[in-house]
Amino acid sequence: MQHGLARPEAEDPEEGLSETGRAQIEASGRALKRLGLRLDLILASPKKRSRQSAEIVARSLGLGPEGVVLTEAVRAKAPAEETLVFLQGLAGRRAVLIAGHLPSLGLLAAFLLIRGAPLPVAVENGAVMRLDLERLEPGAAVLQWYLRRDQLGLLAGPA
C-alpha cells in the first residue's frame, strides 16, 4: 500500500497526511476490513505519512499498536533486496502489509513477481496490492489483486 496523499513540505515539514490522504487511507482500511483481510503485521517507514497510514489501517483491522513496526527497510529508496532480507527475518509473520513509498513499493513488487528484466508497477496513494508468496525470494510472488483508491472507496462505503 502506498501511503495517503501528504501535506506539502511548506505546510508541514514532516509531510504528514493531508485531510484527503487521511480520508483515502480510512476508506482503504474500511474496504480491507470488509474484504476480511487479516494481517499479522504492518510495516511502515519512520516518515510521518507512512506511519500515519499504517496506524489508520491497523485500527481499521483491529491490530493494536504492536501490530505496526517502523523500519528503514521500507523507506522511499530502499533497495528491494534490503526489504526482502527484512521480510525474511519476520519468522512466522505470513500476512504483512507495507505502508510504504514510491519508488520502492513498485520496485519491490516487480522484484518479487519476476526475475530479470524490470517490470513497471504503478502504485497510487491509498491503493493496495496483494502478492502471495510460497517462498520469500525474487520471482516467487503471485499477484492476487490490486485495488485502486476509487475501487477501495466503493468497497468501503460511507464513513
Image (cartoon, rainbow, N blue to C red):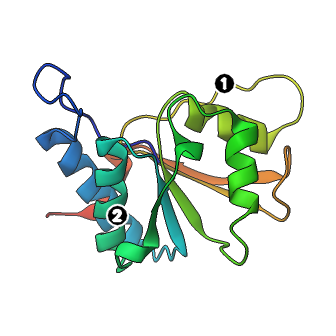
Q: Quadrant of residue 154?
A: bottom left
- Sequence-wise, which precedes: disc 2 or disc 1? 2
User: Which one is in front, 48 or 21?
Assistant: 48
Image spot of residue 57 (x, y percent): 34, 63
Q: Is residue 108 left or right of residue 76?
A: right
Query: Which residue bears the numbered disc 1?
Result: 120
Dot 1, crowdedness within 10 Å: few (<14), some or many (≥20)? few
Q: What kind of residue is marked 2?
A: Val
Residue at 28% across, 62% down: 56
The answer, for residue 132, to whether it is visible in the render is no
Q: Nearer the viewer, mark 2 or mark 1?
A: 2
Residue type at numbered disc 1: Pro
Residue 1: image location, x then y, percent? 47, 48
- What is the secondary structure assignment of the residue under circle 1? loop
Position of the C terminus, as image quadrant, is bottom left
Vertical side of 9 occupied by 105: above or below: below
Q: Is residue 14 left or right of residue 1?
A: left
Q: Is residue 58 left or right of residue 98?
A: left
Q: Residue at x 42, y 34 (%)?
A: 124
Q: Is residue 7 left or right of residue 63?
A: left
Task: Tell me: residue 18, above or below residue 90.
Answer: above
Q: Residue furthest top?
A: 10
At x 47% / y 43%, what residue is drawn? 100
Count neighbours of disc 2 (C-alpha within 10 A) and say few if under 14, some if 14 to 19, many if 20 or more: many
Rounded to the nearest angstrom, the CA distance separating label 2 from label 1 is: 26 Å
Examine the image and state in which quarter residue 125 appears. top left
Residue 144 image offset from top left, x and y in percent: 66, 56
Res. 119 visible in picture: yes
Q: In the figure, 29 relative to 60: above or below? A: above
**Helix, strand or loop status at disc 2:** helix
Q: Which residue is mark 2?
A: 57
